[in-house]
Image (cartoon, helix red, strand yellow):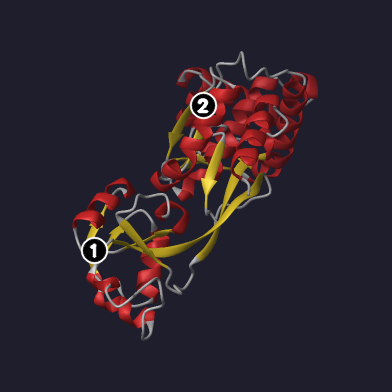
Amino acid sequence: MHINEIDLNLLRLFDAVYRQGNVSRAAAELDLTQPAASQGLMRLRRLLADPLFERASGGVKPTPKAQHLADAVRQAMALLESAFNASTVFDPFQSRRSFRLHMSDIGEGRFLPGLMQALNQTAPGVRVETVFISSTELSQALDSGRVDFAFGFLPNLQGAGLAKAQLLEDRYCVLLRQGHPFLARAQGGEAMPGDLLTRLRELEFVAVRSHSDTLRILQWLQLDDRIRLTTEHFTVLPSIVRATDLAVVMPRAIAQGFDLGYAVVDAPLPLRDFSVSLHWSKRFEAESAHQWMRGLIMTTFRG
């Protein structure tokens, strides 16, 4: 087989099927019909004299030859994308580009106000859409371009094709309502007597199901039996804390943004220190729009 026989679109199809593990999802990513994708895959199989992908549970799995080709194809595609995209000038003031960002509901509260303010000043036509993608799918979503950036404390998001930049450092604290009985022994902001971590057993907690780090802290302290309420969303927590004697473990930077009706307790919690980073795929980092948005985010949020 000669390289002249290979259509670039067939390599794009191969790369998409390999990453997605599913022909239908690969077709959707490339804006192809299912028959067109299947036909292209059949043509590539004939050219390479190999099945390339075999049926598996939930989709397809690569053959040894496909495994061998995958990295070379991906590197070649990334090189071409970088070369083409680098020559495209991005004008933020004129652009109506849409960026998709992965972030949790806590992340939305922390980053969206500042980001939208910065965009209104420098790129009034640029649009933003936030999505939440499971940790098992996030790497693939970045690599395929389904999302442009991911925000968060994401220690398991790793890979040779990914890059990141730290945006800020934070720590977890305990948030209570002002006037909570727990605070009565503290006068003038002085430390409470006794072992503060032990005294946390006096409290009952509300927790968010999707925020595993806060749940892990409570389990570490053997306070999981003190969880009175578990919710699906972070946004409901301030009103619950204000109206009850329930406490919540949350990032300090978020807690300090609430009004005077709340009190922050800086307890020496285990695993309390963490960093929030911006993550992206190296496949797209040479694209001028990607470079501009990445720079805006880091300028806006880096201390």
Label 2 to label 1, Cα distance in Å? 45 Å
Instruction: Determine whether 83 is above or below 299 in the image.
Output: above
Name the residue carrying label 2: 29
Residue at the spot x=23%, y=71% of the render? 181
Q: Residue at x 56, y 38 (%)?
A: 149
Q: Position of residue 115 (x, y in %)?
A: 53, 34
Q: In terms of secondary structure, where does tag 1 sit? A: loop
Name the N-terminal-most of marks 2 and 1: 2
122 sits left or right of 60 in the view: right
Tell me the tag on residue 246: 1
Tell me which residue sits at (42%, 54%) in the image.
256
Of residues 254 and 183, the one nearer the viewer is 183
Look at the image and tell me whether residue 231 can be seen.
Answer: yes
Dot 2, how many residues are within 10 Å of its Cα: few (below 14), some (14-19), or many (20+)? some
The reply to whether residue 42 is visible in this rendering is no
215 relative position to 115: left or right: left
* Residue 87 occupies quadrant: top right
